[in-house]
Image: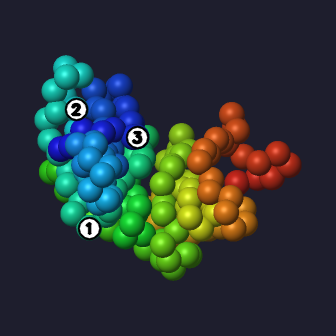
């Protein structure tokens, strides 16, 4: 793994930490060559000692992973990451070191660069920013293997959302959570 962590997810109750890499840092040092940096689409599964990577989950076609989220309370110890350049949401199996595409963001905006994520404590909603598309997507992830888009917030061209925060009660003021 190139080790340039951008995202981190922790489930201390099961001693599990996962990081996501975006770019191989060594490929950014020679700016004179005119070649872009090489994306490092991989997630590292860390051991009980923070300095030990137990397993690397490589996602060859993702084109860089910015963020990662472990699914709260998931007995299978799975998580999610998004391929920034291939528009895919990946379900990560931390036990087997595999990733499987489970949602295609190009159905919302091709080349939208899905990046940052927030997940509700009850593990039913996943919010993902699409930087280039200027959108934030709310997914129903109650069935982790079959996420469904519930809503898309369009912030407008050039907005490039770089942060997502949820309210303390994880609902919008004056609204109740949808059940679909």
Q: Give the quarter of the figure containing the C terminus.
A: bottom right
Q: Nearer the viewer, mark 2 or mark 3?
A: 3
Horizontal arrangement in the rendering, residue 172 relative to residue 55 (left or right) = right
The residue under label 3 is: 7
Image coords of residue 34 (percent x, y): 32, 59
Q: Secondary structure at mark 1?
A: loop
Q: Looking at the rendered structure, which numbered label has been put on residue 81?
A: none
The residue under label 2 is: 46
Q: Tell me, yes or no, if residue 73 can be seen here.
A: no
Image coords of residue 113 (percent x, y): 48, 63
Q: Nearer the viewer, residue 128 or 149?
A: 128
Q: Residue furthest front?
A: 32
Looking at the picture, does residue 95 appear above or below residue 12? below
Residues under labels 1 and 2: Cα distance?
A: 23 Å
Q: Earlier in the sequence, mark 1 or mark 3?
A: 3
Q: Nearer the viewer, mark 1 or mark 2?
A: 1
Q: Hey, which quadrant is residue 134 in on the image?
A: bottom right
Looking at the picture, does residue 7 appear above or below residue 130? above
Q: Give the quarter of the figure containing the N terminus.
A: top left
Q: Hey, which quadrant is residue 132 in on the image?
A: bottom right
């Amino acid at each position: 793994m190139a080790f340039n962590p951008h995202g981190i997810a922790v489930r201390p109750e099961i001693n599990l930490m996962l990081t996501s890499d975006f770019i191989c840092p060594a490929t950014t040092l020679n700016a004179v060559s005119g070649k872009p940096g090489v994306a490092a689409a991989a997630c590292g599964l860390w051991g009980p000692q923070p300095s030990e990577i137990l397993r690397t989950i490589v996602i060859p076609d993702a084109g860089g992973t910015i963020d990662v989220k472990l699914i709260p309370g998931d007995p299978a110890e799975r998580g999610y990451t998004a391929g920034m350049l291939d528009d895919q949401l990946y379900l990560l199996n931390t036990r087997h070191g595999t990733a499987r595409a489970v949602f295609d963001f190009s159905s919302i905006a091709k080349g939208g660069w899905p990046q940052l994520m927030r997940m509700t404590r009850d593990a039913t909603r996943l919010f993902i920013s699409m930087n280039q598309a200027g959108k934030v997507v709310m997914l129903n992830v109650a069935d982790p293997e079959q996420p469904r888009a519930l809503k898309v917030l369009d912030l407008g061209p050039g907005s490039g959302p770089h942060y997502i925060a949820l309210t303390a009660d994880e609902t919008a003021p004056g609204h109740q959570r949808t059940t679909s």
